[in-house]
Image (cartoon, rainbow, N blue to C red):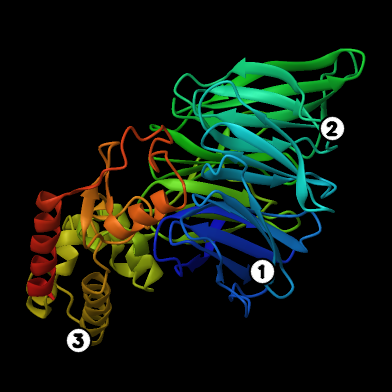
Amino acid sequence: MATLIHTLADHSDDVNYCAFSSSCLATCSLDKTIRVYSLNNFTELPYSPLRGHTYAVHCCCFSPSGHVLASCSTDGTTVVWDTHDGRMLAVLEQPSGSPVRICRFSPESTYLVSGAADGSVVLWNMQSLKLYRSGNVKDGSLVACAFSPNGNFFVTGSSCGDLTLWDDKMRCLYNEKAHDLGVTCCDISSQPISDGEHGFRYFQMASCGQDNQIKLWLILFADFLGVELKYKCTLNGHSAPVLACAFSYDGQMLVSGSVDKCVIIYETSTGNTLHTLSQHTRYVTTCAFAPHSPLLATGSMDKTVNIWQFDLKHPCAGNTVENESKVAVEDWSEDDVSAWLCAQDLADFVGLFKMNNIDGKELLNLTKESLTNELKIESLGLRSKVLQKIEELRRKTISVPVTVPDEFLCPITRELMKDPVIAADGYSYEKEAMENWISNKRRSSPMTNLPLPSLMLTPNRTLKMAISRWLETQQKHS
């Protein structure tokens, strides 16, 4: 059984990544910050949030000891932080200045990998905090990375669909076309498995992509054989691109998050679905298991991170966990209303509400008269209790924050644009943000990473008028 025990809602924009250490959880966002929480009570540490990046933060990860945290950003840097006091230890600039999409520590904390939108891969020496080796994938942006448990090799995944194996000297060992429409994430289990045939020990890897699939692979790394990558199987269940995947610490479970807003937890050995979690209201962008406790974190474009706890003794095949708090009440089904009644200690009314086909819209329209005359609830005390709970629900519904249309947000700052301009790549940006981008000697598009044929910025008056009209509408409604 997976139970939702906490929801973190401190980020003001999409959550891009989350990562556990043995005592903390780190999350990062398009809002340019990294937040760090204690696992004891999920309160933020005194130094959180960490502010040092000038643009969106795409990834964050702890060193194996948990003493150091790394984060990487569209601003072309990977920042290393001290987790004791939040001090910035180093700013590692990608040599090309390209947006950094992924960062990962080696198991011994010897190295830190950073991968960028232009396909560049850098191996940083963590003792000297200097560049040790660098390379490039064949095509596409580098969007995924995972180290083997022994640190002998690491895998990168690219937006063109390739998985590439590298040794710790940055020599390319193997390349495999894995996902036709692009890789989005990959992970290697910390627990090696035996093939049972030759006695070889394999590392198990998972990859996911824009093709809606999760694939399991076996990697054999031996001096006398070189590297062998074997396809094992495909896990289905998602109806849209899969954006994240991660193994549990013991390797027995694999979790995935998708554009379909669902999180699926699989049993690794059989591929069976153990849980489907449908709490998030927008794309699920990240998921991570805690290393030494039965916790799972899932992050989403709905700006929240959900913390789930497992009862490991009782895995529940096919269990679906729905939760009312993040789904618009008027969109609730009759089953959602039943779940809400149970949560409010009103389980005795489930049958009555179902008999009268009460869905979310009907629930919000219930009155004292309809409870008395139509639902025939005779007890004044019970009627009052139901009405009180419905009124609380109405207040929550009204207080839901307004979502700004995505096309009104600057792709660089992720803030509502005041003075939008069109760049030579055809995209619209906030004028000041794009001018800063260009003044930092960047000559590539923030969206495509391709060279800009011109640095001319043209005012987008149509978009500016649309934003003004939208703002006026919001003011009238409020």
Q: Assign the C terminus to one quadrant of the image.
A: bottom left
- Whole-percent x, y for residue 93 in the image: 62, 50
Extreme residue toward the bottom, this view: 381
Mark 2 Cα-neighbour bin, 10 Å: few <14, some 14–19, many ≥20: some
Label 1, label 3: how far apart the Cα atoms are = 44 Å
Q: Secondary structure at mark 3?
A: helix
Of the residues tagged 1 and 3, which is closer to the observer? 1
Residue in front for this viewpoint, 231 or 341: 231
330 or 454, which lies in front?
454
- Which of discs 2 and 1 lies nearer the camera? The answer is 2
Residue 162 in the image: above or below residue 66 = above
Mark sitting earlier along the chain (1/3): 1
Give the side of residue 368 with respect to residue 238, left or right: left
Q: Element at badge 1? A: loop
Residue tagged by mark 3? 380
In the picture of the structure, the residue carrying the numbered disc 2 is 152
Q: Where residue 79 appears, x then y in whole percent?
A: 64, 57
Please identify, in this view, whether the residue under mark 2 or under mark 3 is nearer the observer. 2
At label 2, the amino acid type is Asn
How far across and how far down the image is residue 203, in percent? Answer: 78, 29
Figure check: 198 above or below 3? above
Q: Is residue 267 visible?
A: no
- Identify the residue at image location x=52%, y=48%: 286
In the rendered structure, which disc, 2 or 3, sits on the residue that comes first in sequence?
Answer: 2
Give the total of numbered labels.
3
Residue under circle 1? 39
How busy is the neighbourhood of tag 3: few (under 14 within 10 Å), some, or many (20 plus)? few
* Foreground pick, 370 / 29: 29
